[in-house]
Image (tube, grey):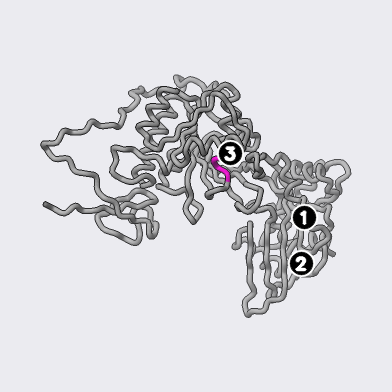
Amino acid sequence: MAKEKTVYVCSACGYEMPRWMGKCPGCNAWNTMEEQAPQASVSQAAPVKANKQRGGTGARALRLDEIPEETSARASTGIAELDRVLGGGVVEGSLMLVGGDPGIGKSTLLLQVSEHLARQGARVLYISGEESARQIKMRARRLGVSADSLLILSENAMDAAEKRWEEIQPDYMIIDSIQTMYRPDMASAPGSVSQVRECASLLMRMAKTTGCAVFLVGHVTKEGAIAGPRILEHMVDVVLYFEGDRQHEYRILRAVKNRFGSVNELGLFEMHEKGMIPVANPSEMLLSERAKNVPGSCVIPAIEGSRPMLVDVQALALQTAYGTPRRTTNGFDAGRLALLLAVLEKRAGVSLFNQDVYVNVAGGLSLSEPAADLALCAAVASSVRDTCIPGDWAVMGEVGLAGEIRAVSQCERRLSECARLGFTSAVLPRENARHLKAPEGMRVYGVETLAEALSILIG
C-alpha cells in the first residue's frame, strides 16, 4: 500500500506545496506553510459522492440601463457610531467582517445590534460556534437584551446551520465566529484555509441570493491581522477592526474596507457593564484629562472621515545619555517624525542633535493627515524650550522641507469644532486664513513659515 503524501498549505493565501518551504511562493509570506492531510481518495468501486457545491445563478448578462436602480434604504443598527462607520447603516445582502483582539467587545456589540434590529421587526439569527445558548443568555441578561424575534443557535457545522436558516429565513444573521465553522464533507480541521474559504463562500452566496445581511466575527493573529486566508477580506463587502486595550474603557472601531461608504470613518465606544456605549462627543472625551499649562502639549483639530475631532499631541524632549538620540513615537509615523525634526532644526533653529524625543497622540488615536505636522513641531519646540503653549489655542498646518506652511482642507469645520469647545485662538496656514470666515470670538493667525508659527506660539 502506497504511503499517503501530505501537502503543505499556506495559511495566508491557500497555496499548496508537496514539501515545506520557509517562504510561500504564492504570497511571499514567511513561516505560513502548514502540514495538512490530503483529501481521502475515492476508489473506482466506491460510490461517487454527490457534489455539494451549488451551481451558478444562471443569470443573463444585462446592459447598464437594464439593471434596476437600488431603491432599498439602509437599515439603522440603532447604534449611531456603528452606523457612521458603515456609511449610514446596513445594506441589504451585505457581508460584513468584524475583527479584533479576544475580549475587546465584538460579541457584545453584535448582540446589542441584534436586539436593535429585532426590535425594528426584523428576524435575526445569532449563530455561535464558540458558546452555548446558556452562555449567550447570560450575556443577554447582563446587557438587557430581550427581543422576541432574536433567535439563538449554538452550532458550528455549516450543513446543519444552513438547514436552520433556510427554515427561519432571517433578515439578519451573525456568525460568531467564522473560524469555528466547518463543512463536514471536508477532511480539514475547522479554522484551516480551505474550511474558512468554503464557509465564507457559502455565506456570501446566501447573502447575495436571499438579501440577508450577514455579520462575521473574525479572530485575529498576534500581529493583529484577521486569522485565516487573505481571500476572506476580499470576499466580504465590509471589514471592521476593533482597536483598544482591554485594560481601558475606550474602544475604536475602524473601517479598513467598505464597498458602501468611506473607509476614513471611525467610531468611538466606551465599555460598560451594560455593553458598548457610543461616545457622541469624542473631542470632549479626548481632552477631558489633558494637562494644561505644561510644556510639550498642543491641540490639533483633526478630521477623521467626516468628523472634526480635537486631539492632544504630546512631546517630551530631554538630553540624551547615549551617542545617538532616540526617536520614539506612538500614534504618529516614525519616518514623518524624523523628517519634521530635521526641518525643525534646520529651518527654525531648534537644536535637537543631543535630544531624545518622545511623541504620543493621546487617546490611542493615530494621526496620518499632513495637517498634524505643525502641531507636532510646536509640541516638540515647546518641550525643548520648556515653554507652554496657551491651553485655548489650536494649531494646524502641513510643514514642507523648506519650512513653509501649506494649506489644509476643511479648515472652517475644524475651527467650528474648536469654537464649540471654548478655544479662542488658532494658528493655521496663511493661505487658509485669506479665504476664511472664522467663528465669532475666535482670533486666527495666518503663518507662512515654521519659524513664524513658533514665534507666535512660544516666543
Which tag, 2 or 3, sits closer to the chain's start? 3
Amino acid type at mark 3: Leu
- The C terminus lies in quadrant: bottom right
User: Picture quarter containing residue 194?
Assistant: top left
- Main secondary-structure element of the magenta-colored stretch: helix
Residue at image mark 3: 109
Give the magenta-colored segment's residue range.
105-110
**x and y percent of residue 220 in the render?**
48, 50
Residue 85: x, y in percent? Answer: 60, 38
* Mark 1 neighbour class, 10 Å CA radius: few under 14, some 14 to 19, many 20 or more: some
Q: Regarding mark 2 in the picture, which secondary structure is present there?
A: helix
The residue labelled by disc 2 is 383
Q: Label 1 amino acid? A: Arg
In this rendering, the answer to whether 347 lies above or below 392 is below
Q: Is residue 254 magenta?
A: no
21 or 28, which is in the foreground?
Answer: 21
> Is residue 444 found left or right of 15 in the rendered image?
right
Q: Indicate the secondary structure of the residue bearing disc 1.
A: loop
Mark nearer the N terminus (1 vs 3)? 3
Residue 402: which quarter of the image?
A: bottom right
- The correct choice, above or below, for 67 with respect to 313 in the image is above
x 55%, y 42%: residue: 106
